[in-house]
């Protein structure tokens, strides 16, 4: 387990699972689709606070931790920049996102509200292959690394052509199908298969 992490920038990858792209009626991308959340969105607690009078959906994702400064030049170099793996929820105001997309506007407001980057800070040195999300003990999402369109290394290398990394940067690497709404009182369990889960409650 990697401890005492100071999270810096938050990068996110959209539509990295074909099933999720299709469930929202989107085209499957041919290169990583990148967006950001502000640093103030980070929530590492056991409570998920969602805005009132808004439909907020969960998107379960593997979160990659960047362990050094700079920018890799090859896929092999990209591997050396990754220092850990965990899970997170990219919370999304779906109605607002749909409205913004229809107008050709950026998604920022639908993705970067307070507490919308839920992160388990128990980063592992190696990434388990399967992960899942349960809401009120019912399975909502289940993902497998083999179903990712772009690998962790491909994502890191693609981002490195745009930015220089800082140690402590994190990357949400895309969600499998099964996204759905969260409401007050929901009991949420997210975890890697065969590992202890993280339990959260929606307030």
Image (cartoon, helix red, strand yellow):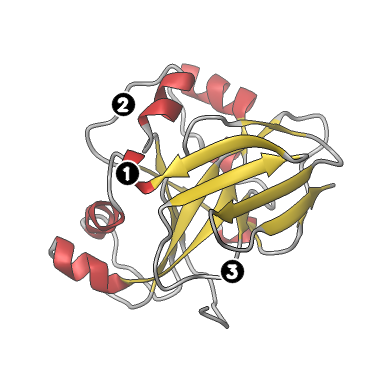
Residue 158 versus residue 133 in the image, above or below: below
Question: Which one is in front in this view, the residue at disc 1 or the one at disc 2?
Answer: 1
- Residue at screen point 41% across, 49% down: 173
Q: Residue, x 41% and y 20% (percent of image)?
A: 22
Name which of mark 1 and mark 3 comes first in the sequence.
Answer: 3
Q: Position of residue 134 (x, y in %)?
A: 67, 42
Distance of mark 2 from mark 3, alpha carbons? 30 Å
- Residue at numbered disc 3: 121
At numbered mark 3, what does the secondary structure look like: helix, strand or loop? loop
Image quadrant of residue 15?
Answer: top left
Give the image location of residue 51, x and y in percent: 78, 40
Most foreground residue, 89 or 68: 89
Q: Position of residue 70 (x, y in %)?
A: 26, 74
Q: Give whichever of discs 2 and 3 has the lower sequence position.
A: 2
Number of the front mark, 1 or 3: 1
* Near-viewer residue (19 or 65): 19
Neighbor class of circle 2 (other Cα within 10 Å; few <14, some 14-19, many 20+) is some
State the residue at coordinates (46%, 42%): 143
Residue beneath disc 1 = 146
Q: Is residue 142 visible?
A: yes
Q: Which residue is mark 2?
A: 28
In percent of width and height, residue 132 lies at 56, 45
Relative vertical location of residue 3 with respect to residue 109 in this rendering, above or below: below
Classify mark 1: helix, strand or loop. Answer: helix
Q: On the rendered structure, is 137 left or right of 118?
A: right
Mark 2: secondary structure: loop
């Amino acid at each position: 387990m990697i401890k005492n992490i100071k999270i810096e920038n938050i990068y996110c990858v959209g539509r990295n699972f074909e099933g999720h792209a299709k469930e929202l009626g989107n085209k499957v991308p041919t290169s990583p689709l990148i967006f950001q959340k502000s640093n103030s969105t980070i929530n590492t607690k056991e409570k998920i606070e969602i805005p009132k009078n808004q439909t907020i959906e969960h998107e379960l994702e593997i979160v990659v931790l960047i362990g050094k400064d700079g920018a890799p030049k090859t896929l092999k170099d990209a591997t050396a920049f990754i220092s850990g793996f965990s899970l997170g929820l990219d919370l999304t105001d779906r109605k607002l996102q749909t409205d913004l997309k229809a107008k050709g506007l950026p998604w920022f407001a639908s993705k970067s509200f307070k507490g919308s980057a839920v992160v388990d800070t128990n980063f592992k040195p190696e990434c388990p292959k399967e992960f899942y999300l349960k809401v009120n003990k019912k399975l909502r999402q289940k993902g497998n690394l083999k179903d990712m369109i772009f690998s962790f290394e491909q994502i890191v290398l693609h981002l490195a052509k745009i930015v220089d990394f800082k140690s402590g940067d994190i990357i949400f690497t895309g969600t499998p199908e099964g996204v759905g709404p969260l409401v007050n009182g929901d009991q949420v369990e997210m975890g890697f298969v065969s590992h202890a889960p993280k339990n959260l409650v929606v307030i």
